[in-house]
Image (spheres, rainbow, N blue to C red):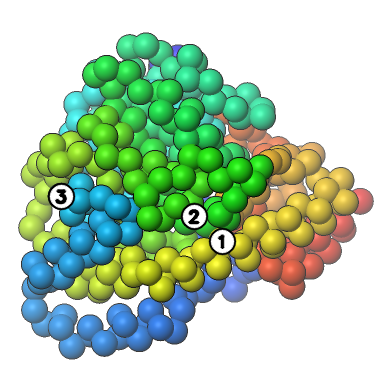
Amino acid sequence: MLEDSVDPAMLRHHGDVEARPGMLDFAVNVQGVAPPDWLRERLAARLGDLGRYPSSDDERAARAAVAARHGRSPDEVLLLAGAAEGFAMLPRLAPRLAAVIHPSFTEPELALREADVPVARVILERPYTLDPVLVPDAADLVVVGNPTNPTSILHPAETMRALRRPGRTIVIDEAFADAVAGHGVDGSGDGRSGPASEEPESLAGLSAPDVLVFRSLTKTWALAGLRCGYALGAPEVLARLTHGRPHWPLGTLQLEAIIATAEPAAVAESRQHADRIAADRTAMIDRLAALGVDVHTPATGPFLLLRVPDGALLRKHLADLGIAVRRADTFPGLGPDHLRVAVRGAAEVDRLIHALSAALW
């Protein structure tokens, strides 16, 4: 339904504000604290080029690398200073009514509302299964996350396709798609497309005039401070998104990072990351469940949605112990007893479980 009263501060809230320096960070979904050594070396090798404006050759090379990764044409690739820049461009599509599937990342809704685009929230109840009939027929723009932040739900590719209607554009936020293990939730692998077919249910390889996919390099490659991402879509749609965009929108290091992480060896490494995340997630779910914590499953992303008693008080207790978790009541459809935690390794989870044990019992 259309919302008459929305708190922009809630939509603007992100997990980074919860994690103060020195805290054990379960609030932010970035994997690791810095890019891998090989990527850092690639970026460092370009420092001597910073005295020149970003090269058009680098821009073309980055679009070609992304296109090759997803089996697309380079003119179907729009390079972005992070996926968030792409969300800020959505109002340029001039939708009459935008439907946003929730609970989900709030940046798209914020960008649309700030541009005075009417927004209908489609709030899913647990288990957060998406039924396309819930989307208003009048919506000519639909935004959905896959996998969805913070529920960690992976919607089937067929469900994404079922959202399509004449005159409607589907925007799929696949910021975490490269962190999904290759066989998905049920091991079927259905919904794969394109050369990066190890990303279950992704539509990144689908060339269609009405499907727009946003991707991020922030999470898997620990590049939150560099702001790198891209959009995949029809050239005419991408042209509308970039109308009025300033020249040199991405810097040399951003372009180099996009080229490097789209190369086959890097894609293979990201699949290894996804497998490790899946193993860590399974172990983390088991330990949290054994403690009596309500963990939403199935989960496919590098984060988990929890429901706990006295969520706000528990967050404060954990913060006092130097552990940051993400409040989830800023996501439409969730309440103060919902928390989101990033998937971490055994040593970090040991500290979290010990702190939760003291707080809950």
Q: Secondary structure at mark 2?
A: loop
Residue of label 1: 274
Q: In screen coordinates, is 256 left or right of 23?
A: left
Coordinates of residue 167 in the picture (x, y in percent): 24, 19
- Amino acid type assigned to the residue bearing label 1 in the image: Ala
At 46% from the left and 68% from the top, the residue drawn is 268
- Amino acid type assigned to the residue bearing label 3 in the image: Asp
Using a 10 Å C-alpha cutoff, classify the residue at mark 1 as few (fewer than 14 neighbours), some (14 to 19) or many (20 or more): many
- How many angstroms separate mark 1 from mark 2 (CA)? 10 Å
Q: Secondary structure at mark 3?
A: helix
Coordinates of residue 190 in the picture (x, y in percent): 53, 40
Numbered mark located on residue 75 in the image: 3
Above or below: residue 45 compared with residue 67: below
Q: Secondary structure at mark 1?
A: helix
Determine whether label 1 and label 2 are within 8 Å by CB: yes
Residue of label 2: 198
- Amino acid type assigned to the residue bearing label 2 in the image: Glu
User: Could you tell me if residue 320 is visible in this image?
Assistant: no
Quadrant of the rendering where the N terminus is positioned: top left
Using a 10 Å C-alpha cutoff, classify the residue at mark 3 as few (fewer than 14 neighbours), some (14 to 19) or many (20 or more): some
Coordinates of residue 56 in the picture (x, y in percent): 8, 67
Q: In screen coordinates, is 28 left or right of 276?
A: left
Q: Earlier in the sequence, mark 1 or mark 2?
A: 2
